[in-house]
Every structure is written in C-alpha cells, then in structure tokens.
Amino acid sequence: MSQSQTQQQNSSNNGDTLDSNWRSDALDLGLDYGMQTIAVRAGQHRTDEGEHSEPIFTTSSYVYTSAADAAAHFDGTKTGNVYSRHTNPSVRTFERRLAALENGERAVATASGMGAILTMCLAYLKAGDHLLAANQLFGSSIGLFNNYMAKFGVEVSYVDCFDNEAWANAVQPNTKVIYCESPSNPLAQICDIGYLSQLSKANDILLVVDNCFATPALQRPLELGADVVIHSATKYLDGQGRVLGGALVGSDKLMQEAFTVVRSGGISMSPFNAWVFTKGLETLKLRMQAHCTNANQVAQFLVSHPNVRTVHFSGLSDHPSHELATRQHHMKDGYGAIMGFEVKAADDGDSKVAAWHVIDSTQMVSITNNLGDAKTTITHPATTTHFRLSPEARAEAGVKDGLIRLSVGLEDVEDIIKDLARGLDSL
C-alpha cells in the first residue's frame, strides 16, 4: 500500500482497520535512500505534536474510543496499540529502523540479546528437532542450547564454523536451524554465510546469523542468504554501554512467529531502551568506521609484538578468513573491532597468569565483559564469558588460558596501544 493510500485509509473513523500511529514511516523507503539517511530518519512516525526527535512512549496501556474499538484491537480486525508488552510506538520505531538497515521486512525487539536467541529457539524449534550450531559461540548461547533446549527435547550439535564440509556432514533429517555468529565471540572467526545459505535451502533449514559484531554497517546477512539475523543491541547498536536489548530481523512470516513468542512470553524491550537504541542507530555507520580504523592499527601492533603468540582478527592479510571477510563485509577495510590475542608466558609458564598480567597492567582500558562500547574493553574469556563451559568445550571453541578478548573503542588509538604495551612489554 502506498503512503497516500495509507493516509486515505486512516482518514475514516469507525471503519478504520489501521490506527493513525501505525502509518507508513516519515521516510519513504521506496526512494532508495543511503544507509546513513536510513539510520537517521527511518521508522519514525510523527505525532500531532509535530516533534522532530523521536518521543519516548512510557505507557503500559492505551485508550480506545469505545468498547467496540477495544474489541477490534484485541481480535485483530483493527491494527494498533494494545499493550506495551508487545506494542509500543518507541519500540516499533527502533524495529522499523533496524529492519530497514538490515534490508529485512520486519524486526522484533527483545529485552536482551539472549532474549532474542531464546525467542529464536522458541519460535523455530520444538521437541525432536535438531539445532546445528558453530563451536565458536558466546558462552551463554552454548549454555542456553545445552542446558535448556536439550532439556526440552531439542537435539544440539556443534561444528567448526569455518569447516564447510563439517557443516554439510552434520546436517540431519530433523535439522531445523543452523545457527552461527560471524564474526564469532571471542575469536572473531568468519562463517561462509553464502555457503551455509545454500546448504540450508537445499535441506529446508532456517539459517540464523548473529550479526552483533559486524552490525548492518559492515554486513547484511539477509542479503547473503540468511533467513534470520540476531542482534544483541546492547553492543554496537547502542554503542555506549548504556542499556540492554536484543532483536531479530527477517521476513514478515518468520518475524510474526517471533513476535508471538515475545507477546506470550513477555521477552519485551522497554520503551526507554528502544529510544536509546534508535538514537544509537543514527551514528552506527560513523562509529563502526572509527572502530574499524582503530582496530586495524591495534591488530598490526599486536601481531608485531614479540610477546603475542597469535592474533585472531580477519583484518590481517594472512588471516585464513581474510578474503571471505573482505567479500562479506561491504565496508572497505571494515573487519569489526573485536579481536582475540594469545600471549606468550615467560619461560613456558602459566599462560593464564600471563594473560591476567596484561589485563591488570592496563590503566585506561576497561576490564569488563561488555563489548561494542565507545570505551575499549578487555577480558579473559576462559574465566569470564566462557567459564561455565567445560575445559573440553572451551578447547573446542578455541578459548585457551592465554587468550585475551579486546573490544577496540574510540579513544585515540595511540593511547589504546600504549595501554596494552604496559603489560605486554613487561611479560
């Protein structure tokens, strides 16, 4: 329906099937605007107040014109706001903007990134199904799959994210979802999304890609053949470590299934958090450009340091996934800002002690498990984000005791390098 047709439909009263605040976006996406314009303007519906900035709708419920109007909202004959657990204008603005940036038909917002992954599981899996995932995942994702989805009858298995043959060999007749992070946490490994898309479509499987580390500023998995994109909006979509949130993006049909889970399960994003994320999206592309520029320089420093054994970062030309990352990431020299690096222990000593020494020697970099912040953050995955995994599972994921995860921020890059050198130089 065109914008003029929508407005004409909204001009009637009792016959309305669409509330006025569900009109088309203020920005006509049919005019082929660029990404930065979409990030600044898409998704907003201006109220009768004529506000320029997006408002925050801190309301739990909505008022109807009559009992019949209320009934029409609840039985679905009229589309509009019902209850903020599943319909809120601030949340809807964020959903529309993110969907436009990912080139998806619809987005569904959730209370956190893990809430988005749980929503995915509940929407697309049932007892007797098989979930095929990459070994290289955030520790909490593995915990959710192993401890809870398996508990309710979903079979789960893992393969190396970069081994296409292993993916193909692990597909079973009951495989319903293939799930991966690309880049992955904490080693920033790259999956061949195009190959996984072909494999999924050939076997009637949904391909779900966590795009948290790349964001649509660097990579749009739906355009590479994925069916669903997952985000921890807490990370780069906000970009300043302020609030929690998550999202799924995909087709209208798949997102309706996810929306039903959020509506019934209450895995809802708050209006205030949605507003923060909406404002964060305005600067996403600009921030990611700056993050990547800093990360490329930090990686070059680390790879040349004598006390660094290995740097896991696809922006390095000799990285095994460099060519693939270059092909999948549409921003020039944009490889993300998350990297893992393994330190050398003196005289073959304890690698964990060496890693902790580097972390504890920093004076400016933040020791925290969060990432995607304007501030550079550093953590020891084996004892933080992945500590609940068994030693065997950590080994399969490549999380060694000497591994450090770095989220490169927006400080002067010389200061980031100087801070890391304090501990590395004194190993």
Image (spheres, rainbow, N blue to C red):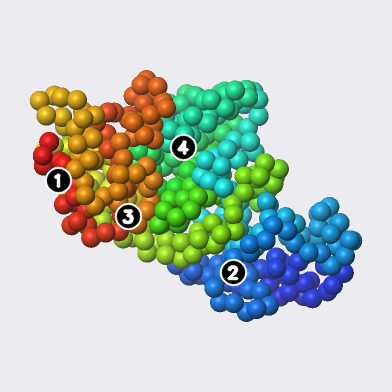
Dots 4, 1 in contact, CB < 8 A? no
Dots 1, 2 in contact, CB < 8 A? no
Residue 364 in the image, given as x and y percentages of width and height = 24, 52
Tag 4, which secondary structure? strand
Residue 34 in the image, given as x and y percentages of width and height = 47, 68
Amino acid type of the residue that numbered disc 3 sits on in the rendered structure: Lys
Q: Which mark sits nearer the N-terminus, 3 or 1?
A: 3
Disc 3 to disc 2, C-alpha distance? 27 Å
Amino acid type of the residue that numbered disc 1 sits on in the rendered structure: Arg
**Quadrant in the picture for residue 60:** bottom right
> Residue visible at 57% across and 47% down?
111
Disc 3 to disc 1, C-alpha distance? 18 Å
Residue named by callout 2? 55
Q: Residue furthest right?
A: 68
Within-10-Å neighbours for mark 2: few <14, some 14–19, many 20+? some
Q: Which mark sits nearer the N-terminus, 4 or 1?
A: 4
> Residue visible at 37% across and 20% down?
392
Tag 2, which secondary structure? loop
> Residue visible at 65% across and 78% down?
49
Q: Which mark sits nearer the N-terminus, 2 or 4?
A: 2
Disc 3 to disc 4, C-alpha distance? 26 Å
Label drawn at residue 375: 3
Dots 3, 2 in contact, CB < 8 A? no
Amino acid type of the residue that numbered disc 2 sits on in the rendered structure: Pro
Name the foreground residue: 186 vs 199.
Answer: 186
Quarter of the N terminus within the rendering: bottom right
- Choose mark 2 or mark 4, whichever is in front: 2
Within-10-Å neighbours for mark 1: few <14, some 14–19, many 20+? some
Residue named by callout 1? 422
